[in-house]
Structure formats: C-alpha cells, structure tokens
C-alpha cells in the first residue's frame, strides 16, 4: 500500500478550503461558529445549476500541519457543510 507524502509547507501559512453547502445556509455564520475569533476570508465560488448548493473558498492562517488538519475535520463535521476539499 502506497502512502501519500506529507506536504512540505513553511508554517505559518495561509491555507484555502473549498466548502460546499446548501444555499439556504449562511456560510458566514457557520464559519464563525467553527473559527470563532480567527481571522479569515470567505469568497463565493459558484452556485449549482439548480441553485440548491453554493461553494465558497475559505482562506485562513494555519500554524502547523495539525492545525490545518484539525480545521479540515471541524469543517467536515459541521452538519450544514456538505463537502470540504
């Protein structure tokens, strides 16, 4: 079984997550719940063809690999977020 190599990043650095959620939810409120006081940027990317889903790019400063992975899992676990990339 082949393992993927660990990313070689110079921390701290800005990292972007792609979020997909139902258009009925407020991405700003959801991200604020998860990140609390952390400074971040949210940019809308696209809407689905029927307008049911929206995607956003979340940019946040991560301090190390554990921080980056923890944020990914917190975002992924939120009930209103359908996908995190």
Image (spheres, helix red, strand yellow):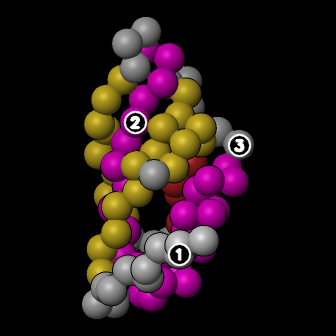
Residue at horizontal 48%, vertical 24%? 53
Which portion, as a residue range, is magenta? 51-78
Disc 2 to disc 3, how far (Cα)?
15 Å
Residue at horizontal 42%, vertical 29%? 54
Name the secondary structure under disc 2. Answer: strand
Eye-nearest disc, 3 or 1: 1
| Mark 2 touches mark 1? (CB < 8 Å) | no
Residue 29, visible in the rendered structure: no
Mark 2 or mark 1, earlier in chain: 1
The picture places residue 58, in percent across and down from the top left corner, at 37, 55
Task: Verify whether residue 35 appears in magenta.
Answer: no
Residue at horizontal 62%, vertical 53%? 76
Which quadrant: the N terminus? bottom right
Q: Quadrant of residue 25?
A: top right
The picture places residue 69, in percent across and down from the top left corner, at 55, 73
Disc 2 to disc 1, how far (Cα)?
29 Å
In the rendered structure, find residue 3 and report the number of the disc placed on it: 1
Q: Nearer the viewer, residue 83 or 57?
A: 83
Mark 3 or mark 1, earlier in chain: 1
Q: Is residue 59 left or right of residue 72?
A: left
User: On screen, 67 above or below 38?
Assistant: below
Q: Nearer the viewer, residue 1 or 4?
A: 1
In the rendered structure, find residue 79 and report the number of the disc placed on it: 3
User: On screen, 16 above or below 68?
Assistant: above
The residue singled out by tag 2 in the image is: 55
Q: Residues within 10 Å of mark 3 (few under 14, many from 20)?
A: few
Task: Verify whether residue 77 appears in magenta.
Answer: yes
In the rendered structure, find residue 17 and report the number of the disc placed on it: none
Q: Quadrant of residue 44?
A: top left
Q: Is residue 63 left or right of residue 41?
A: right
Q: Nearer the viewer, residue 18 or 29?
A: 18
């Amino acid at each position: 079984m082949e393992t993927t190599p660990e990313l070689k990043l110079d921390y701290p650095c800005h990292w972007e997550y792609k979020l997909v959620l139902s258009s009925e939810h407020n991405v700003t409120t959801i991200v604020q719940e998860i990140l609390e006081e952390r400074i971040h940027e949210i940019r809308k990317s696209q809407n689905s063809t029927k307008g049911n889903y929206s995607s956003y790019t979340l940019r946040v400063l991560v301090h190390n690999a554990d921080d980056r992975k923890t944020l990914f899992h917190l975002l992924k676990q939120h009930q209103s977020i359908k996908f995190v990339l």
